[in-house]
Image: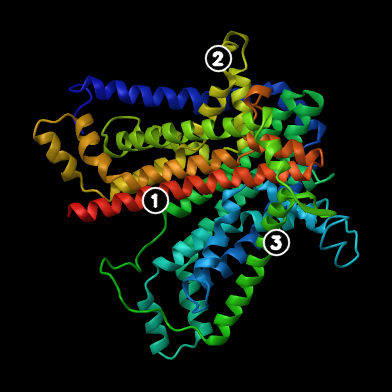
Amino acid sequence: MRSLRREPALFLALLAVASLALAFIVYPQIQVILTPGPDGYVSFLQEGTWLSPLRNSIQLTALSTTTAVLLGFVYAYAMVYSNMRWKPFFRLIGILPLLSPPFVVAAAYTLLFGARGIVSYGVFGQSPNIYGLGGVWGVQTIAFFPFAYQLIADALSRSDPRMEQAARNLGAGSWRVFWTVTLPLSRPGLGAAILTTAIYILEDFGNPQLIGGQFYVLPTQAYNLISGFGEYTSAAAVSTILLLLALGLYLGKVRLDGGRSFVTISGRASSMPRPPVSPGLSWACFAACLALAGLILLVYGSLVVSALTLRFPNNLQFTLEHFQYVTTGTNGEALRNTLVFSSVAAGFSAIFALFAAWLVQRGQWPGKRALDLLLILPAAIPGIFFGLGYVTAFNQRWLDFVYRGWLIIIAFIFWNIPVGYQAAVAGLRQIDRSIDEAATSLGASSMRGFREVLLPMLGGSLRVGLVTTFVRAVTTLSLVIFLFTPPTTVATIRIYQLVNDLNWGAATAFTVADIGMAILALSIFAVLARGRIALGAARA
């Protein structure tokens, strides 16, 4: 990249990116941290009301992360190593929880296993109390295991099978190969899965709020302090504690990623198959995946049936009145808001992340490491803290003329920057600098070289940013819980309100519509990606 002095446009672009990051990432979060002030923090810490939620958060994070990662590892091992059938089906089921608001699992859990649940009461005649630690633990395990599964499966699929084959050739049995070769090779992915899943579980608001009962965690305490007592100072203090925990986990993940070794990848492709898995182990993997997939289908199937029946489960008469209800009036407006806000945010976030990654990755200027840190920082910020920051910073009288929907869109954009940014950085590292340097040596400006040379080569990174931002915007609750107003209500807020009102039919119809939007977006991007590949092949 040429000197910033020789290209004023490049300098202005860098200044704009840095200013936006400071204004919409750093400034709101600092406002939350500074809100209580020294005296406020001292008073809040002395009260001790935060100790129980802190213990609960740590306990729940440890338990739910352990079970979610265990399930994720079994699922990933079955997908990569076993010879079981129905793998495409299981892969599809494995990503289903990623396409829906996590707290939807809690709503379905109540329908299935609550005091008058279809399974607990209808089948077994029991009326268990599912509220509290046990209920949240079970729900979070199902809701968040796909994150662990995706990361572990990626790590297992990247490992070189020649090392496992060498161990088998030296006489090691299947279990010895697993414990001494397979498991150590998957350690980086396993560590990343543990820390990433722990961050998501620690930040989870919807599930503990719906079925936590008197089991309060830090996110629910922060919300209840504001909604019940208007205690912004105490809520800011609680949110700051939550932020410190999340930052600690994220820094551990960054350090793990930075020290990850890829010595098993030699640079030459290996066509050697993985050591065969015994038929008994393949059947065991199939049984485990079938049981988990059955539970997931039971959860989401009950939502679909509830949305299409009059009064589920007492009156199973088919009806579309719930969908008519959610597509008209203010409910229809909430769906439109979700689609518009998420689409606009996805487009801006993906392009901004790609451009910022180019400035940082290809730039040689002082302070680029600081900007790099700012752009990945939102990955460690809990949604409820991020949203509270926007309320604290931008809920000002002189900004009343601004449409509140733009505040939600901006929050979506900058909270989701890290995924698209890191995907773009990874893509740029795979492109030799000589390619864009050739363009500048022929007289093109750095900006033109980026637009005409690099941008067409980074389509995959752009799609990652688009899809991830859209899906997260469609499914998030904690980020918008403090930001919405009646005219800017989104689908997740309405689902949450309807679940609290025990209006299961409307809540499940909203959920199906919300998941449908996420699936439709993924399908459109998949078709566009295939079309791009086919076009490229035709031109070649």
| Numbered mark located on residue 54 in the image | none
Give me the residue at 81% from left, 36% from top.
49
Nearest the camera: 420 or 194?
Answer: 420
Place of residue 409 in the rendered image (x, y in percent of width and height, measured from the top left): 52, 28
Quadrant into which the N terminus falls: top left
Q: For residue 325, which quarter of the picture? A: top right
Closer to viewer: mark 2 or mark 3: 3
Residue 160 placement, left or right of 49? left
Q: Amino acid at mark 3?
A: Leu
Give me the residue at 46% from left, 88% from top.
172
Q: Which residue position is annotated with label 1?
A: 527
The residues tagged by marks 2 and 1 sit, at their Cα atoms, a distance apart of: 37 Å
> Vertical placement of 457 versus 118: above or below?
above
Q: Amino acid at mark 1?
A: Val
Residue 3 placement, left or right of 63? left
Quadrant into which the C terminus falls: bottom left
- One can see residue 33 in this view: no
Q: Earlier in the sequence, mark 2 or mark 1?
A: 2
Q: Amino acid at mark 2?
A: Val
| Numbered mark located on residue 402 in the image | 2
Place of residue 363 in the rendered image (x, y in percent of width and height, measured from the top left): 27, 34
Tell me the element at label 2. loop
The residues tagged by marks 2 and 3 sit, at their Cα atoms, a distance apart of: 44 Å
Nearest the camera: 199 or 291?
Answer: 291
Tell me the element at label 1. helix
Q: Earlier in the sequence, mark 2 or mark 3?
A: 3
Q: Which residue position is annotated with label 3?
A: 298
Residue neighbourhood size for the residue with mark 2, other residues' Cα within 10 Å, grouped as few (<14), some (14–19), many (≥20): few
Count the numbered circles shown.
Answer: 3
